[in-house]
Each structure stands twice: as C-alpha cells, then as structure tokens.
Image: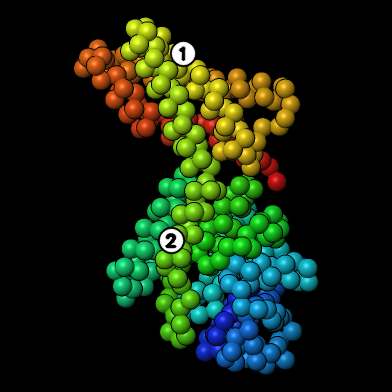
Amino acid sequence: MRVAVVVIPTYNEASNIRQLIEQIFEVGQKLSKWKIKVLVVDSSSPDNTANIVKQLKKTNKDIYLLLTKLEGLGKAYVKGFKYSLNNLEPYVLFQMDADLSHDPKKIPEFLKKIEEGADFVLGTRYSKGGSIPKNWAFHRKLFSVLGNIIIKLGFAKPNISDWTTGYRALKSWVVIKFVDKVEKYSGYVFQVATLDESLKNNARVQEVPINFIDRLEGVSKINSIQFIIQTLLYILFNSSFIKYALVGASSAVIDFGLSFIFIEILKSTIWLGTLISVEAAIIYNFLLNNFWSFSHKKIEAKKQSYATSFFKFNLIQSFSLFIQISGIQILANFFGEKYWYLYKFFILALLIIPLTYFMYNKFIWKSKKT
C-alpha cells in the first residue's frame, strides 16, 4: 500500500483544523490502495491550533505535528516536505490549505491521476468543472484570473490553467528535485516556482477541476501587491521564454543593424542583405540561448553534441530565413521596398519568434529525462 502524506501549513487555524483533518481521514478510509497520513506544520500560532492537533494525535497515529517559526508559506512547506521524506516514506505528497477552501473529497481524483502516470496533479479552478467563489469582489477575480494569464504567457505554457492553486499532489521524486531551490519563495510565488522547477525536470503534469471555497473562519494571509511584484520578478529571471525573447530582441538589433548597413548604405539587394544579417544573428542566438535561455537543459559540452545541435539550429533558422526572405520580398513587391523594415518586424514578431521557440524546445533543447 502506497503512502500519501497531506502537508498542511497552519497559522491561526484553530477554527478549521479539526474539521479538515477529520474530513481527510473520512476520505482516506474509503481508499483501498492508499494509506493517508496528515502532517500539520504549525508556524507558532498564538491561538489553539497546535493543541488541537496534539489532541487529535492521541487517537490517530497517522497525524503528525511539526512546530516551526513563522517564516512564510514557502519555508513551512519545505520543512514539511523534508520531514515527510525523511520520516514518513511518502509516494505522494499533497499540498492543501488549512482553511477548508480545498475539498478533501477530491483526494481520490488526484490519486487516480497519479495512478494513471501523472507526476504532478494540480487542482485547477480555471478549467471545465472548476470554479472560484461567485461572491468574490471583481478586483479579486480580476487579480486571480489575470495573474494566471500573465504567468501562462510568461512561461509560454498555455496548457496549464492554474499556476497559483494551492491544492496539489506531487510524487516524491518531483519534490526531491526542487525542495532545496524554492525555500526563499512564499505565497503564490512559491506555487509558481515549484511548478516551474517541476516542469524543468520533465514532470508530467495533469489537472483536476476543483470548486474553490472561500474561507468562512479566520483571516486570509494574501498580500496582493507583494505577490504581483514577486511573480513578475520570478517570471523575468526564470522563464526560458522571456529569456529567449530577450535574446531574440537583442539579436534583432544585430539583424536590423546589418540589414540597414547592407541594404541602405551599401545598396545591396534585399535578399543578400537579409541573408548576411540573419546568419550573424543565428550564431549569436545559438550561443546565448544555450548558455542562458535554456541553461537548465544546456547541450552537453562535447564537440559532436555542439556540431549536431548547431546543425539542427541552422536548419530551423534556414526555414526562418526562407520565411523572412520570401515574406519580405513578396511584401516589397506588392507594397514597395520603402517599408521593408516594417515587413521584417511583423514577420519576426508574429511568426518567427513563437515558431522557432516551439521548434527549439522540440528538437534542440529537449527536456532532460529524470
């Protein structure tokens, strides 16, 4: 029988914790293939949270309590994960809020996804069958929905509908991979970071729709302004797509600059100027993408690996080059050569950048097997 440990960080959740734990074990009794354990990580709550858990422990040996300092959600989860991995032999670790926002009755659906091959299961509010509270104020709905859209675009992962959900199930190997890297993050940013690191380690992610229930007791710990700033900074410094876009933007300067020199100053033909400028940008692109944008899956430092990858890179870029040259030339024939730079800009922004990013990930900087 496999073990699933539900890790629950708490701070002043005396009004909710007993009911939540009881509901979890009610669900656990109906599972034939899984043994449920609950670890409460209490961050020195001044209310009665820890004492309530201690009382419950007396009659249930599968309840555990870890007392910590108040250091934020990220550190609480990291300590809970490490304690579980070292002492409770989990096959799966759950994340769950302590305020009854997450329905324990969904646990079997998460575990079914795990049994079917998922490594990381998200409880999503934003796919068919999921929901957020109808009574949420407009600004909170906008904040949540728009925040997830920005994150999806920032990481170029439109297939993941809910990056910030706190209801999750993760295989132990996934947690082991990221647990030492995400301790400095907290709140929603912690959720974004753990999912990002898991995807970079090639974890198979699935989703389960959930109906998020707003807390009835206690006080929310969300700091919206802090979340927005921290999330944008995290995306900026950790998204391979953003890094790729920045490399692309800087290489476009090289591309446009050389095109201008050859076409406008040296009066070469458009196709020749474009050919020279693009090939220079190709070399620049390959080096910066390998050592920065896709550094987490960098090409092995072998001559053969570099040669093969650079050849593939050039094939993709040759396709890009063909699109640029033919596209610019066709548009120039129809609308005149005067606006060649506009044609080039729109072809790069709307077609070349998204297409080559997909192809790079598919054929050159592939996800490394765990």
Depth order, front residue of 208/244: 244
**Pointer 1 and pointer 2: residues touching (CB < 8 Å)?**
no
Q: Residue at image x 42%, y 27%?
A: 253
Depth order, front residue of 125/242: 242
In what element is the residue under mark 1?
A: helix
Q: Position of residue 156 (x, y in %)?
A: 46, 44
Mark identifier at residue 276: 1
* Mark count: 2
Q: Position of residue 319 (x, y in %)?
A: 46, 20
- Give the quarter of the image for residue 350: top left
Q: Circle 2: is it few (<14), some (14-19), or many (20+) Cα within 10 Å?
A: some
Q: Residue at image x 47%, y 37%?
A: 246
Mark identifier at residue 228: 2
Residue farthest along the front direction in this orientation = 265
Mark identifier at residue 300: none
Q: Is residue 202 visible?
A: yes
Q: Residue at image x 39%, y 67%?
A: 131
Quadrant where the N terminus is found in the figure = bottom right
Residue farthest along the left direction in this orientation = 335
Q: What residue type is disc 1 on?
A: Ile
In what element is the residue under mark 2?
A: helix
Q: Position of residue 107 (x, y in %)?
A: 57, 70
Q: What residue type is disc 2 on?
A: Ile
Depth order, front residue of 230/145: 230
Q: Is residue 208 visible?
A: no
Q: Position of residue 165 (x, y in %)?
A: 49, 64
